[in-house]
């Protein structure tokens, strides 16, 4: 895939899949009385159309003659002095075209810079895709291993829900031997918990401690991850089942 942009602004920001490249178009200039003016709009449009149609003049100082409106211009090209950082899997090139009016004395001169992007940008990362497995560590302790094969998310705010046993509470959360949160009184199922550090999901293994032993039975535990600031974070959920 190939796309070209003819730049007709003094400064133009091109934004492509999140990567911004800033390019500058030289001001059109005239040699008459040392003043700087822009060429007529219809001349600019004709020049842009010519370049988009694939016209490729010789390298400066050699020139080719073209008719733009009621005037004849001598045109040549040279590498543009731009620093471009294209996205992954793409390349970029920039060429500056010099248009000199051959019908006036002294002639008007203006420049157009064209940036061409080639290739295909990398596909966006997949959306978060969570899965989890649950394990009974003890009558009062649950281990939940969370895996995410999509885009990683980072948060320190979580909540745990489960079916039945509504009188039980979570009193602590661990990652390995690191205690991320504790509360002797405990919190009810579904209560948002703020951990002492942010975790990347990614893959994480968390252990939840309950204030009293859960009765024997089959449980489905659901972990909620609250991602983003403010009152309306994005909420991700992942569930797993285990026999107690």
Image: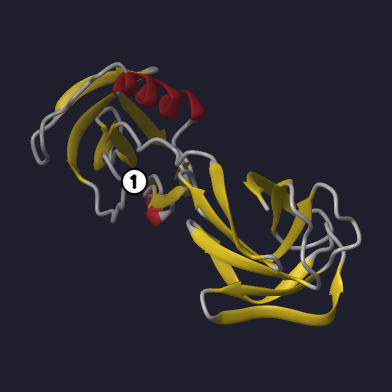
Which structural element holds mark 1? Answer: loop
Location of residue 149 in the rendering, given as x and y in whole percent from the top left corner: 45, 44
Q: Of residues 127 and 121, which is closer to you in this image?
A: 127
| Residue 128 shows up from this direction | no
* Residue shown at 8% from the left, 35% from the top: 62
Is 110 situated left or right of 151 in this image? Answer: left
Task: Name the outermost residue toward the right.
Answer: 167
Residue that label 1 marks: 87
* Residue shown at 77% from the left, 60% from the top: 214
For the N terminus, the quadrant is top left
* Residue shown at 9% from the left, 41% from the top: 61
* Residue shown at 36% from the left, 46% from the top: 30
Q: Of residues 10 and 180, which is closer to you in this image?
A: 180
Location of residue 88 in the rendering, given as x and y in whole percent from the top left corner: 30, 45
Classed neighbour count for the residue bearing mark 1: other residues with Cα under 10 Å, few (<14), some (14–19), many (≥20):
some
Location of residue 33 in the rendering, given as x and y in whole percent from the top left corner: 39, 53
Q: How many marks?
A: 1
Q: Quadrant of residue 231?
A: bottom right
Is 145 situated left or right of 214 in this image? Answer: left
């Amino acid at each position: 895939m190939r796309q070209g942009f003819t730049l007709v602004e003094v400064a133009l920001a091109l934004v492509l899949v999140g990567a911004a490249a800033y390019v500058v178009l030289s001001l059109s200039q005239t040699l008459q009385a040392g003043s700087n003016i822009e060429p007529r709009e219809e001349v600019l449009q004709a020049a842009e159309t010519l370049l988009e149609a694939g016209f490729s003049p010789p390298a400066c100082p050699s020139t080719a003659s073209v008719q733009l409106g009621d005037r004849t211009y001598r045109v040549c090209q040279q590498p543009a002095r731009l620093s471009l950082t294209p996205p992954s899997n793409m390349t970029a090139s920039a060429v500056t075209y010099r248009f000199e009016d051959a019908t006036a004395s002294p002639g008007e001169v203006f420049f157009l810079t064209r940036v061409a992007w080639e290739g295909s940008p990398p596909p966006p990362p997949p959306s978060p895709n969570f899965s989890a497995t649950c394990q009974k560590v003890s009558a009062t302790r649950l281990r939940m291993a969370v895996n995410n094969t999509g885009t990683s998310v980072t948060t320190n705010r979580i909540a745990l829900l489960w079916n039945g046993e509504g009188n039980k509470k979570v009193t602590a959360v661990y990652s390995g031997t690191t205690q991320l949160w504790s509360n002797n009184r405990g919190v009810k199922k579904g209560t948002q918990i703020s951990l002492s550090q942010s975790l990347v999901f990614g893959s994480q293994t968390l252990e939840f401690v309950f204030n009293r032993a859960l009765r024997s039975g089959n449980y489905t535990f659901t972990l909620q991850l609250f991602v983003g600031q403010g009152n309306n974070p994005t909420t991700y959920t992942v569930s797993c089942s285990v026999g107690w």
